[in-house]
Amino acid sequence: MSSKIPVLEIFGPTIQGEGMVAGQKTMFVRTGGCDYRCAWCDSAFTWDGSQKATPMTADDIMAKLEQTGGGRFSHVTISGGNPALHVGIAELIERFQEKGIASAVETQGSFWQDWLLNVDDVTISPKPPSSEMTTDWSRLDTFMMRLSARRDGNHNLKIVIFDEEDLVYAKQVHGRYPDVPLYLQVGNDDLDNQDPARLRDHLLEKYEWLVDRVMADPELNRVRVLPQIHALLWGNKQGV
Amino acid sequence: MSSKIPVLEIFGPTIQGEGMVAGQKTMFVRTGGCDYRCAWCDSAFTWDGSQKATPMTADDIMAKLEQTGGGRFSHVTISGGNPALHVGIAELIERFQEKGIASAVETQGSFWQDWLLNVDDVTISPKPPSSEMTTDWSRLDTFMMRLSARRDGNHNLKIVIFDEEDLVYAKQVHGRYPDVPLYLQVGNDDLDNQDPARLRDHLLEKYEWLVDRVMADPELNRVRVLPQIHALLWGNKQGV
């Protein structure tokens, strides 16, 4: 018996544009469904009903990855939506391990799955006030504790920053989990902009603001600040 | 007795714009002197005589870092020139360890120093054909072997790519040290451009070329491809 996974898109190889494996050559599997509704979500089509997901088994997904990526990948990123909603991903991670494919997952830390213990790079991305979501700290504590107990693999926190209030939230998260590497990422507040060159200038201006704020703050010394590289290259285009 | 270090600049905190700790909040110490003369060196002032270095002890450097960075740093990057020319850096790394400051060093791998064993993140950046330098493979082999023997810390290879010939070289390096994470970085071939917005468009075009080439190549699946983030933000300005 296998539990199907709702899939919105499978594409690549392309670069991972964000976080701890930024620049990594990777395939993407984007799952549908999310327990959050972030105000600024850049993948709202995974949960707002505007695009239909395809229910796929781990073998279906593996076949599609191989058909799309050929021999040109050895790393797969599972993103969403919130991939941790889907128990069926356990089987997909097993396939990756059999084939020597490295894996990365991003999730907000609101739902736990045991298969997270077998993912190479786990990014936990709690959502700051600008998202209009509320963090359930006791759930996040449990999630972080379970992840810290594993022997192999890396994990990190990533927080998208739009404003000063988000920075206060980031410091709260950093203080709560001081040993977990923290990445701050500038938010894209211009999702309707279809001119990549103008969007690029705007995003780099925002990024510079965030860099300046972090540089000035003694509480944020061990932090890494990154732009979304794919947005600088390709703007708001889906599937790259 | 302490061995002085020739220093060109000390600045920060700013972000590390390149490689394995890209985005990290860090101070920079740039040492003078290099055994290489890369055709496209973006820090030629460290070796071409155009700027004078100041001989400093480890304590001098530590004092200057604290004066410049205040309490706003816990990470220092030592760059050059080739920092591995200077035996005196051993003492500086000791100061960092006493103070709980993390360290990163970048060197081409042509000279070994035992203090490299105590650096948290070592980037080895062999120079491809476009640099007009010739790699001494037996020296590089010895360097890589010594670094691999240490218990703590990370190390990675970074190669700056300007053209197809450089990519062939990168694959040769990747094949020789397959277990060391490899970063490819697009080269800045427009060092005289004083218009950050135009330079940015040009560098992102070059970066997209490099991304496309790596995505198409099955021999480069485990590679990470990055732009120079600081050049996107601040162009060719020194000291940021």
Image (spheres, coloured by chain):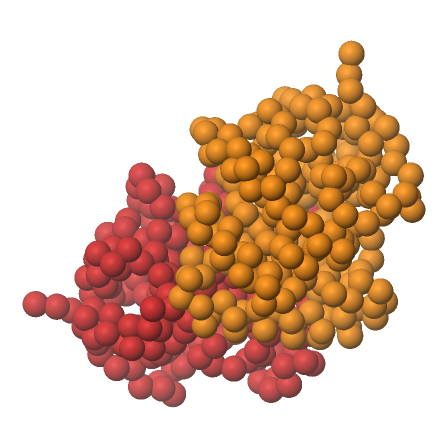
Chain colours: A red, B orange
Residue under the image location 68 percent in, 43 percent down? B26
Relative height, residue B39 to residue B179 (above, below): below
Relative height, residue A152 to residue A109 (above, below): above
Residue A56 appears in which quarter of the rendering?
Answer: bottom left
Q: Residue A198, percent across and down? A: 69, 81
Residue under the image location 72 percent in, 49 percent down? B14
Instruction: State left or right for residue B108 relative to residue B155.
Output: right
Instruction: State left or right for residue B183 relative to residue A122.
Output: right
Residue B191 appears in which quarter of the rendering?
Answer: bottom right
Residue A115 appears in which quarter of the rendering?
Answer: bottom left
Instruction: State left or right for residue A118 relative to residue A21.
Output: left
Quadrant location of the N terminus of chain B in the rendered image: top right
Q: Is residue A224 visible?
A: no
Relative height, residue B225 to residue B126 (above, below): below
Residue situated in front as seen by the camera: B33 or B135: B135
Q: Residue B138, percent across and down? A: 55, 37
- Exactly how many numbered labels are in the figure? 0
Q: Residue B219, percent across and down? A: 42, 62
Q: Residue B48, percent across and down? A: 86, 46
Residue situated in front as seen by the camera: B143 or A23: B143
Residue under the image location 77 percent in, 34 percent down? B65
Residue situated in front as seen by the camera: A123 or B238: B238
Q: Is residue A118 visible?
A: yes
> Which residue is at the far top?
B1
Instruction: State left or right for residue B142 relative to residue B96.
Output: left
> Which residue is at the far left?
A1
Residue under the image location 37 percent in, 65 percent down? A73
